[in-house]
Amino acid sequence: MFLYLSGWLNRLLIGVFYQDRARPSLSSRQVSIDVLSGLTVALALVPEAVAFAFVAGVEPLVGLYAAFIVGLITAVIGGRPGMISGATGALAVVMVALVAQHGVEYLFATVILMGVMQLLAGVLRWGKFIRLIPYPVMLGFVNGLAIVIGLAQLEQFRTHDANGDAVWMSGVLLNMTMILIVATMVLIWLTPRVTKLIPAPLVAIGVVTGVVLGFDINVPRIGDLASLAGGLPVFAFPMVPLTMDTLIIIFPYALILAAIGLIESLLTLNLVGDMTNQRGGASQECIAQGTANVVTGFFGGMGGCAMIGQSMINVKSGGRTRIAGITAALFLLGFILFGSGLIEQIPIAALVGVMFMVVIGTFAWNSFRIMLKVPKSDALVVVVVTIMTVLEDLAIAVVVGVIMSALIYAWNAATRIHASTRPSHQEKGALVYDIQGPLFFGSAESFRELFHIADDPDTVIIDFANSRVVDQSALQAIDDVAAKYDAMGKRVMLRHLSRDCHTLLAKSGQLMIDSDDDPDYQIAVDYSVKMRVFGGSH
């Protein structure tokens, strides 16, 4: 373990301070772009962190501290420069029940345990399993999350009446808010056509804020959500009893939060990687997320994970190195310590306009065209994952999508197995079954039905040259067929099986025919299990 962590730390330091060919050179221009991009991201983080804190049922500073700490640590040691992490809605909706029943101190303890689980996933290199997520699931994830980000902005169209009750905007207030949102979106669209030296969202926020302050337009501002003023986060152990009862309470929440956090982070890692032409870093991202959440729990933060919306803002604003994420976190801390009065004057409409542009840029519009060309089953996966992401949560949506894709693949592969028969040129009077298609648990029953045991001659050769034996169910199906021939006094010879199949099936008394072109792949079955199944003879 020590050697692994030492090697990981060495690779980490190289990744932080060394720019390889896949990343932009650390020029003065790139540094300035990253700093300005970080400022833009920090501004967009503020209302999100405050809103998600309200969702989780905690104070706004709990969300802001999480955005700062998680954002800073993952920016320094994360698996992908350009990614932005912080407090997210996907985690907040899980936290609210825990906070309501047991209080915020139990939340801090849960976040620490969540981080430990994520660290374990990173050390065990479980991040690589993100490769198993099919592309239709990725499309559904991106589309669903874009819709979720868009729906989250609708809450900003609420205001409070004279009695303090939340009501939907109407009249002049609604019209002015919509005008400012559209103006922000138009500025973001126009700015890159004039200059790319300053991130378009930052220009739009600055111009719209200047107009609102200059003309004293009465629209909701960040300060209307909550006060951002505060001090540095303070280290403290969560005030919970260190008992088994506490562990029983927090463990289920920690497990769910760890899974959701890693799934969202690793999917965002892949998405950012596609946009910036970078690969790898999944296990490092797990370690970064885990470290960030452990630290956050001890400093009074609500925990977090990668944020696809802010990551898209950063990447599309030109942020490519770790400097962007680091400066975003430091700007956010500066807002809390020194700049709360100024930041609270920014109209919420400007930030909503930025997030609407993120929605437009994130949603995979080409998926409508793709779904008309791909198999209907893949199109169904895209739609189901999108709907599940919106109605439930990301983790459930991805799990459902992966299971659907796996079942569809298994069914398609199972229907591909078939056989043709011909007389043998080597064994006089023998009949050869040429098997085509993969033999595994899904096709095992169809394989058994390929043979006409009663009508076949006394010698039968089963040739697997155009097939592949995949798992234990396949071996069992072969053994079952051979046993039925043996029970009728007929001889079965098996050809073109891998060497491990030779060994195992020979133990059950089957006659193998060695060939120079026998495959050498290994079947995916534990050897001890196979010995127990095929150890006897017929």
Image: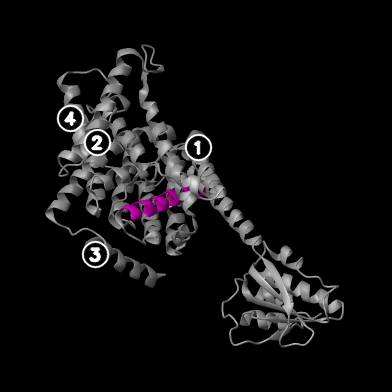
Badge 2 marks a residue whose secondary structure is helix
> Element at badge 4?
helix
The three-letter amino acid code for the residue at tag 1 is: His
- Above or below for 279 versus 307: below
Pointers 1 and 3 in contact (C-beta within 8 Å)? no
Q: In front: mark 4 or mark 2?
A: 2
Residue at the disc numbered 2 = 189
Number of the front mark, 1 or 3: 3
Real-space CA distance between mark 1 and mark 4, rounded to the nearest whole angstrom:
45 Å
Quadrant for the C terminus in the image: bottom right
Residue beneath the point at 66% across and 60% down: 415
Helix, strand or loop at disc 3?
loop
Q: Earlier in the sequence, mark 4 or mark 2?
A: 2
Quarter occupied by residue 349: top left
Of helix, strand and loop, which mostly describes the magenta segment?
helix
Picture disc at residue 21: 3
Magenta residues span 252-275
The residue identified by callout 1 is: 102
- Amino acid type at image mark 4: Val
Marks 1 and 3, how far apart at CA: 50 Å
